[in-house]
């Protein structure tokens, strides 16, 4: 009898863990995005479709770094309207980050092909890699950046 009770408790314990795993969403990198804005479909962005995630046209702020799109909404004090790095919002920030520049002119216009960054110096590549690591540690990835369709 006691053995049966113990077995039932063990089963209940595992069932609870499995339930939490599935429904807490704690490990799902998209959960916060999906909770707050169900219209965002994870996956593919183009320079043009990324542009609206600038904290003005959408409350969400996304930034692309080396063709991966990060949700930087948590860093709205940096990237939101009036923030010091708002030029990066909704944009491929790679070249600006590589050159430690927040000049809008450094970034490729959204109707142009994606910047291949082929001319960067070794130092600029390292700088960009450092920023990439910063974004990986701090923000969730919501998709990839691909060429405009038109
Ligand atoms: C004028 C000199 C600058 C000062 C005083 C400055 C200051 C700061 C400070 C205090 C932070 C916050 C650090 C933290 O809490 O993690 C920060 C973060 C940052 N800075 Fe600067 N910065 C300067 C120049 C630049 C430039 C030229 C760039 C252009 C690439 C830049 C890009 C960034 C980025 C991307 C972050 C990370 C924000 C985040 O965590 O999302 N900064 N800066």
Image (cartoon, rainbow, N blue to C red):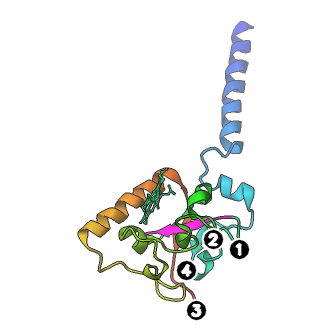
Residue at 71 percent across and 37 percent down: it is 19
Query: Residue 112 bears which disc, if any?
Result: none
Kindly identify which residue carries mark 4: 47
Per the model, the C-alpha gap separating discs 4 and 3 is 11 Å
Query: Residue 54 bears which disc, if any?
Result: 2
Please tell me whether residue 4 is drawn above or below residue 47 in the rendered image: above
Cβ of mark 2 under 8 A from ligand 1: no
Coordinates of residue 3 in the picture (x, y in percent):
69, 10
Of 35 and 72, which appears nearest the observer?
72
N-terminal of the two: label 4 or label 3? 4
At mark 3, the secondary structure is loop
Residue at 72 percent across and 7 percent down: it is 2
Badge 2 local density, few (<14 within 10 Å), some, or many (20+)? many
Kindly identify which residue carries mark 1: 57
Which mark is in front, 4 or 3? Answer: 4
Q: Quick check: marks 2 and 3 in contact, CB under 8 Å? A: no
Q: Image quadrant for the C terminus?
A: bottom right
Q: Which residues are magenta?
A: 60-66
N-terminal of the two: label 2 or label 3? 2
Q: Is residue 43 magenta?
A: no
Per the model, the C-alpha gap separating discs 4 and 1 is 15 Å
Q: Quick check: marks 2 and 4 in contact, CB under 8 Å? A: no
């Amino acid at each position: 009898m006691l053995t049966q009770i113990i077995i039932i408790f063990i089963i209940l314990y595992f069932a609870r863990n499995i339930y939490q795993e599935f429904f807490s969403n704690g490990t799902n990198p998209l959960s916060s995005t999906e909770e707050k804005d169900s219209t965002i479909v994870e996956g593919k962005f183009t320079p043009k479709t990324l542009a609206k995630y600038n904290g003005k046209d959408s409350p969400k702020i996304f930034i692309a770094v080396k063709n991966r799109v990060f949700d930087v909404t948590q860093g709205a004090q940096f990237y939101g309207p009036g923030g010091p790095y708002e030029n990066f919002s909704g944009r491929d920030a790679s070249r600006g980050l590589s050159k430690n520049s927040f000049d809008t002119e450094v970034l490729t216009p959204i109707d142009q092909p994606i910047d291949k960054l082929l001319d960067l110096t070794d130092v600029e590549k390292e700088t960009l890699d450092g920023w990439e690591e910063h974004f990986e540690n701090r923000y969730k990835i919501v998709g990839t950046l691909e060429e405009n369709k038109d």
